């Protein structure tokens, strides 16, 4: 059900060093970097770290969780249902080629301010 999870960290380099070491016995490794954002995984990046927003107190940091959808229609339905339930739309469902050619995701903010996504990795 969970496709990937992201957390915000105070010190990216210290966290990279920690996760590089701590995840190695589990088969996890640093797989991809987008500037300070780093993805870890075994076969694909499933755990991400990124910097805490400038000036944001640590107790206000958001979590990002992405749920795997069976198809693109389910991503659209997830987003529609979340908005109907009062969620804020962060990003309407679309293809995100910066991640990969078939990455289709929609993002909303849950009642506690977390960034929640549904994603399908299959072609149309």
Image (tube, rainbow, N blue to C red):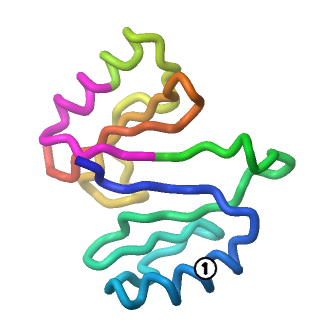
State which region is magenta: 65-78
Q: Residue at x 19, y 36 (%)?
A: 72
| Residue 113, picture quadrant | top right
Q: x and y percent of residue 2 in the render?
A: 29, 50
Q: Left of 74 or right of it: where is 16? A: right
Q: Estimate the x, y position of residue 25 in percent, counting from the top left.
A: 37, 90
Relative side of 23 to 118, left or right: right
The front one of 22 and 37 is 22
Residue shown at 42% from the left, 79% from the top: 31
Residue in view at x 36 percent, y 64 percent: 46
The front one of 92 and 48 is 48
In the rendered image, residue 66, in percent from the top left (x then y), is placed at 36, 46
- Left or right: 115 in relation to 97: right
Q: Is residue 4 above or below residue 41?
A: above
Asked which quadrant contains residue 8, the reply is bottom right
Q: Look at mark 1 in the image and give the residue it sits on.
A: 16
Residue closer to the observer: 110 or 120:
110
Instruction: Give the SS element for disc 1.
Output: helix
Q: Give the residue at x 37% y 69%.
A: 45
Q: Tell me if 21 is positioned left or right of 13 in this view.
A: left
Front in this rendered view, residue 52 or 119: 52
Which quarter shows the C terminus? top left
Query: Within 10 angstroms of label 1, few (less than 14), some, or many (20 or more) residues?
Result: many
């Amino acid at each position: 059900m969970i496709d990937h999870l992201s957390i915000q960290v105070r010190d990216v380099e210290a966290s990279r060093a920690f996760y590089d070491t701590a995840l190695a016995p589990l088969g996890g490794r640093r797989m991809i970097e987008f500037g300070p954002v780093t993805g870890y995984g075994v076969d694909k990046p499933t755990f991400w770290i990124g910097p805490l927003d400038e000036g944001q107190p640590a107790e206000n940091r958001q979590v990002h969780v992405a749920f795997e959808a069976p198809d693109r229609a389910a991503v659209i339905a997830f987003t529609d249902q979340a908005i109907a339930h009062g969620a804020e739309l962060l990003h309407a469902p679309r293809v995100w080629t910066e991640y990969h050619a078939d990455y289709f995701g929609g993002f909303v903010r849950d009642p506690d301010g977390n960034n929640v996504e549904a994603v399908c990795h299959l072609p149309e």
